[in-house]
Amino acid sequence: MSVQLSSEQKIAQLKKRVEEAKAARAAALARKEMAERRLAEIEARVREMGVDPQAIESEISRLEREIEEKVWRAEELLRPFEELLSQQQSGLQQQ
């Protein structure tokens, strides 16, 4: 009788594990569905900005290069004023 009880316990444990696996699968599917909806929302927003979602990485690279160029240009435009300010400060210190 104890062998059969042990078998019944094993069956009960297996049923419990199956139910836990089903619950975990359902939770994973719900998270997947939520992630897919969020991805669709993000892709729609990217399209609204005039960018193909498949080309987002190249667009980010292009924008980074553009920012670097504009920063470099701003620094170039400021350089004469910084030099003038430096000269004025040197003149004041000499007096």
Image: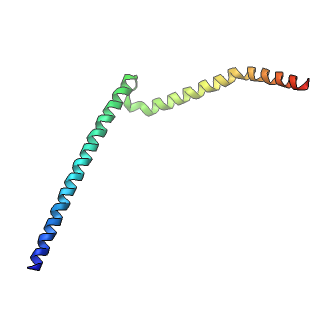
| Quadrant into which the N terminus falls | bottom left
Q: Position of residue 17 (x, y in %)?
A: 20, 61
* Quarter-of-image position of residue 14: bottom left
* Quarter-of-image position of residue 16: bottom left
Q: Which residue is at a point 32% across and 30% down the rendered structure image? A: 41
Task: Give 4 or 60, whichever is nearer the viewer.
Answer: 4
Residue 13 located left or right of residue 47: left
| Quadrant into which the C terminus falls | top right
Residue 44 located left or right of residue 89: left
Q: Which residue is at a point 74% across and 20% down the rendered structure image? A: 81
- Above-or-below relation of 18 to 11: above
Residue 69 located left or right of residue 27: right
Task: Give 62 or 12, whichever is nearer the viewer.
Answer: 12
- Above-or-below relation of 27 to 76: below
- Above-or-below relation of 25 to 14: above
Residue 47 located left or right of residue 34: right
Q: Which residue is at a point 38% across and 32% down the rendered structure image? A: 54
Q: Position of residue 20 (x, y in %)?
A: 21, 57
- Above-or-below relation of 76 to 35: above
Task: Give 14 or 1, whichever is nearer the viewer.
Answer: 1
Q: Position of residue 4 (x, y in %)?
A: 9, 75
Q: Which residue is at a point 40% across and 25% down the rendered structure image? A: 51
